[in-house]
Image: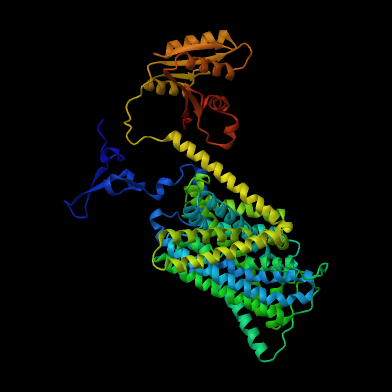
């Protein structure tokens, strides 16, 4: 069979309209191409759709399309993807807002745990902080190597899957997905509580504000990564400036001999248990929440402008430097000012800011509002990475395929909406209580750290390029240290809620394995051998059309059936033989070349007898395919769904997948 040329597959040709010129005798021809509004011609005979080709035709559809444009912006072409890449100054707030914001609650979480051993235990704050910063430096160097080795994106899932196998990759992915959800819940909850500490009028309304904040971040992210970077850059840099100013001013005032004193507050007074190794482990685990999101830059390398991996490495170093400085500064100022965990809701950051900024001054409010902003925007790291990771999992067949598709603004809409939905559910269930959410936090990300670094050791061992021993040693130390942290988390946080994560992660892995099994089975079923030559059909076919009456939708189905087969049968099910004979007379007078079968149903059931007839007909001659054409009315209004097509739905559901029977809808549009 001859192959159709590209020209023959194009829309109908242009029309030529003669036009008169400005001067007598001038003539020109205007070429009117009907397809030009919807398509342009690409290379090698391809047709490229324009924006007009995706615009809905119905009034409601056009209204929805216009509303989305107003809310999210114009539709972006795939060819504009490179323009949506991020420069370093935009990438920093997007990929590091999580780790930057954690200084607002990580120090407080450590002190809350140490309070169980009494106020004397607060002296362990600085040693624990230095230990965490040392771990941060180690992880940063490890991920710099990962970025260099995987310049197209080296997230924990990709590295573990490529070097340690599918199961290790899925454990890393599940751990990250859980941690991304918890990041949104913890950061937004902490941000709103910090805002309520500055504005007591908001107390009691925290949960609705948290839900609204998550929805706001979701909407901004649906506008696209570059757009969200532009919107979130200012709050992030204001927070960084305010925090560094507070730390710098605190150092200067202390050096000048000024006494910094946190305001009096009702201290948190839990039952005293005395110092123990378990309490120190719990405090360390709480402080490690400051490192969640460290891997975000490695996951998002493809989002950077070229050269991607170099820009990502530089961004990661800047991020780690700022985090280490602010975390140590917060820990030191907490000890200098005497800030203590408060039972009245006054956060450690609020107490330190009041001590350094001379009470509730304008600088204090700038910092608190910036903290609220950065904590809410910390969810941005998850909104940047969760959809990207879920799209990779969908591409590999372990997540539903719709997660791999980009929306109108080149964002992974399914992942963004799924993350917002689960995060809102978590906030509502836990009442936005940060102290109840923190124990669930960070164990997932350190599990992914361990698997990623272990995978990198295997990578260097296999590649054995220049300097591979040094690289393998760095990643090996990182893997061992982060594995120890995971064990500490599991022991210290198990009774406080970490057991929930230890159950959810395996369940999520099992779910992804099940999805992968289903997709692989479908791939085998649908596989077409490369050497196979597709010829004409080898089986005959008969067409059967259910008919209730002589109606235009059924006649349209009959006309279609006659183009498909010489054997076309109309089936009429009735409980009134007299009316059926009248129908037969009219049918035979008006319809040619089509047989009519009348099925009497004295028990007044119409669908089941028709299904039984179709099944028996298909079984009589398995060498012939039975095609059932079901007339179906096109729905124009929502209420019509309850008035029409009910029998068609029942027939389609009952017959779909039946051996030897193919069901096809024949849509009928109501004449205007």
* Residue 66 seen in this snapshot: no
Query: Residue 607 falls in which quadrant of the image?
Result: top right
Q: List x then y, in percent, for residue 50.
A: 38, 49
Question: Which residue is nearer to you in this view: 464 or 488?
Answer: 464
Q: Nearer the viewer, residue 542 or 248?
A: 248
Q: Nearer the viewer, residue 565 or 523?
A: 523
Q: Residue at x 49, y 11 (%)?
A: 597
Quarter of the figure with the N terminus: top left
Question: How far across and down, in percent of the image, does residue 509 sit?
Answer: 58, 48
Residue positioned 39% across, 64% down in the render: 465
Name the residue: 48% across, 17% down: 618
**Quick check: 167 left or right of 503?**
left
Q: Is 202 rendered above or below residue 588? A: below
Residue 242, how many percent across, how many down?
Answer: 61, 77
When the figure is inspected, residue 193 is found, relative to residue 393, above or below; the finding is below
* Quarter assignment of residue 139: bottom right
């Amino acid at each position: 069979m001859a192959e159709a040329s590209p020209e023959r597959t194009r829309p109908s040709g242009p029309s030529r309209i003669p036009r008169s010129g400005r001067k007598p005798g001038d003539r020109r021809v205007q070429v009117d191409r009907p397809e030009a509004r919807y398509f342009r011609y690409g290379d090698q005979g391809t047709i490229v759709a324009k924006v007009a080709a995706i615009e809905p035709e119905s009034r409601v559809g056009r209204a929805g399309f216009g509303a989305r444009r107003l809310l999210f912006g114009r539709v972006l072409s795939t060819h504009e993807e490179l323009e949506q890449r991020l420069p370093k100054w935009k990438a920093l707030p997007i990929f590091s807002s999580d780790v930057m914001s954690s200084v607002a609650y990580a120090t407080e979480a450590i002190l809350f745990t140490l309070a169980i051993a009494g106020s004397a235990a607060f002296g362990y704050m600085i040693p624990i902080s230095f230990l965490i910063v040392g771990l941060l430096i180690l992880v940063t160097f490890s991920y710099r190597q990962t970025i260099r080795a995987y310049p197209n994106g080296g997230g924990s899932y990709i590295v573990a899957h490529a070097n340690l196998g599918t199961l290790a990759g899925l454990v890393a992915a599940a751990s990250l997905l859980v941690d991304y959800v918890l990041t949104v819940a913890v950061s937004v909850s902490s941000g709103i509580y910090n805002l309520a500490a500055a504005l007591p009028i908001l107390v009691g309304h925290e949960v609705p504000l948290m839900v609204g904040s998550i929805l706001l971040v979701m909407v901004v992210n649906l506008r696209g990564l570059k757009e969200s970077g532009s919107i979130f850059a200012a709050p992030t840099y204001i927070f960084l400036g305010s925090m560094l100013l507070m730390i710098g001013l605190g150092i200067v005032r202390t050096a000048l001999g000024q006494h910094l004193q946190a305001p009096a507050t009702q201290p948190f007074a839990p039952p005293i248990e005395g110092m123990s190794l378990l309490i120190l482990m719990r405090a360390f685990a709480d402080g490690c929440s400051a490192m969640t999101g460290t891997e975000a830059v490695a996951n998002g390398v493809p989002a950077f402008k070229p050269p991607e991996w170099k820009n990502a490495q530089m961004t990661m170093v800047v991020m780690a430097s700022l985090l280490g400085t602010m975390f140590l500064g917060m820990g030191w100022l907490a000890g200098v000012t005497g800030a203590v965990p408060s039972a009245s809701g006054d956060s450690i950051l609020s107490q330190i800011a009041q001590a350094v900024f001379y009470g509730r001054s304008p600088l204090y409010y700038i910092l608190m509002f910036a903290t609220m902003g950065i904590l809410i925007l910390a969810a941005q790291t998850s909104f940047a990475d969760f959809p990207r990771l879920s799209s990779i999992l969908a591409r590999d067949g372990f997540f539903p395929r719709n997660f791999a598709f980009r929306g109108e603004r080149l964002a992974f809409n399914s992942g963004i909406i799924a993350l917002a939905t689960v995060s809102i559910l978590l906030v509502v269930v836990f009442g936005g209580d940060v102290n109840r959410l923190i124990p669930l936090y960070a164990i997932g990300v350190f599990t992914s750290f361990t698997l990623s670094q272990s995978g990198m050791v295997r990578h260097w061992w296999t590649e054995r390029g220049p300097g591979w021993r040094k690289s393998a040693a760095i990643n090996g130390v990182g893997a061992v240290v982060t594995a120890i942290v995971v064990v500490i988390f599991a022991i210290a946080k198990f009774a406080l809620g970490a057991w929930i994560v230890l159950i959810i992660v395996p369940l999520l892995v099992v779910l992804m394995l099940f999805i992968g099994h289903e997709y692989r089975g479908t791939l085998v079923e649908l596989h077409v051998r490369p050497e196979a030559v597709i010829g004409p059909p080898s089986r005959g076919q008969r067409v059967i059309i259910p008919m209730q009456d002589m109606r235009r939708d059924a006649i349209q189905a009959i006309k279609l059936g006659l183009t498909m087969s010489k054997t076309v049968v109309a089936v009429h099910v009735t409980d009134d033989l007299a009316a059926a004979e009248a129908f037969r007379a009219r049918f035979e007078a008006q319809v040619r070349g089509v047989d009519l079968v009348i099925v009497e149903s004295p028990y007044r059931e119409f669908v089941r007898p028709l299904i039984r007839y179709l099944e028996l007909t298909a079984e009589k001659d398995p060498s012939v395919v039975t095609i059932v054409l079901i007339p179906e009315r096109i729905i124009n209004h929502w209420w019509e769904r309850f008035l029409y097509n009910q029998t068609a739905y029942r027939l389609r559901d009952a017959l779909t997948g039946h051996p030897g029977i193919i069901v096809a809808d024949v849509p009928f549009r109501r004449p205007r």
